[in-house]
Amino acid sequence: MAMVRTCDGSERAVLVVLHALDDDAKVALDRGWGAAASVGWRLRVVLSVPVGCRLAEREAALEAWCSMSLPAALREDGREVREGELSAAAAESASRCVPALMVVPARPEAGRVAEHLVGMLRVPVLVARPARRGAVVGAVDLDHPELPVLRQIAAFTGPVHGSAVLVRSVEDDAAPALETRIGALRAATQWLLPDAQLIVTARPSRVNGILEVARRLDSDLIVVAEQRGAAEPNGELVARARRSVLIIPACWSQPATGTPSPSA
């Protein structure tokens, strides 16, 4: 498969950012290398550590851990240890590669960190949890569906992950106008997601509506657009989801070719 390159000739990469080498990190690494391998992107692994620690020891530990965890044939873009907070380490590393996807472990603060990274770097961020075999659930706007979100739903849907399911929560008093709006959405997405199921839930809470569908279907992945300034930010969704969540930046431009699969 042809490599995805930017205008300066550099190759795109999947950037996995960690702050410990534990089971959560292993899940993130598995998701990251699976995404990279599926389209031929490079993989870059970054470990953020407290300021003042013994870097040589941490670097040796990262090398040993990656050597045991990664396939020998995987095309890597490097491994590095950086002092400071995870967000700062991610930003510094992103300046040295061309991240098309960033992967972080599902820790208690992962939702807040992911939203911050999406807003700061304008790169999709996957909060990684162990893979499931259920559907890919995407949260969409009935009137103005976000094309980058729809593309990611389509790309992440496959035989292993079941069908695509689009979900939207609406107020009860919006029901009379739903038929027209649903018809318009189906027409707009037919070319990209012809077999997608559309579920509209009468839930005032966007987060509750998405999670209700995701849990019922035992979905593998939830795909959402970033929620800058929203009453219900994605941090709450990530914290309660119990499955991987991919956050797409608003007005994000997808790579010209190749889209990662979440299989791992």
Image (cartoon, helix red, strand yellow):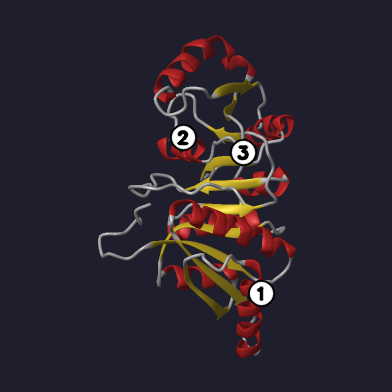
Of pointers 3 and 1, the one earlier in the residue sequence: 1
The local secondary structure at tag 2 comes to helix
Instruction: Using the rendered view, name the quadrant where residue 143 is placed.
Output: top left
Identify the residue under disc 1. 65
From what the image shows, is residue 199 above or below residue 110?
above
User: Can you tell which of label 1 and label 2 is closer to the viewer?
Assistant: 1
Which percent across, then down, holds residue 259? 44, 47
The local secondary structure at tag 3 comes to loop
Residue plotted at (46% across, 48% down): 249
Residue plotted at (52% across, 47% down): 261
Identify the residue under disc 3. 160
Which percent across, then down, holds residue 181? 47, 16
Residue type beneath disc 1: Trp
Q: Nearer the viewer, residue 148 or 51?
A: 148
The local secondary structure at tag 1 comes to helix
Residue type beneath disc 2: Leu
Mark 1 and mark 2: span between their CA atoms? 35 Å
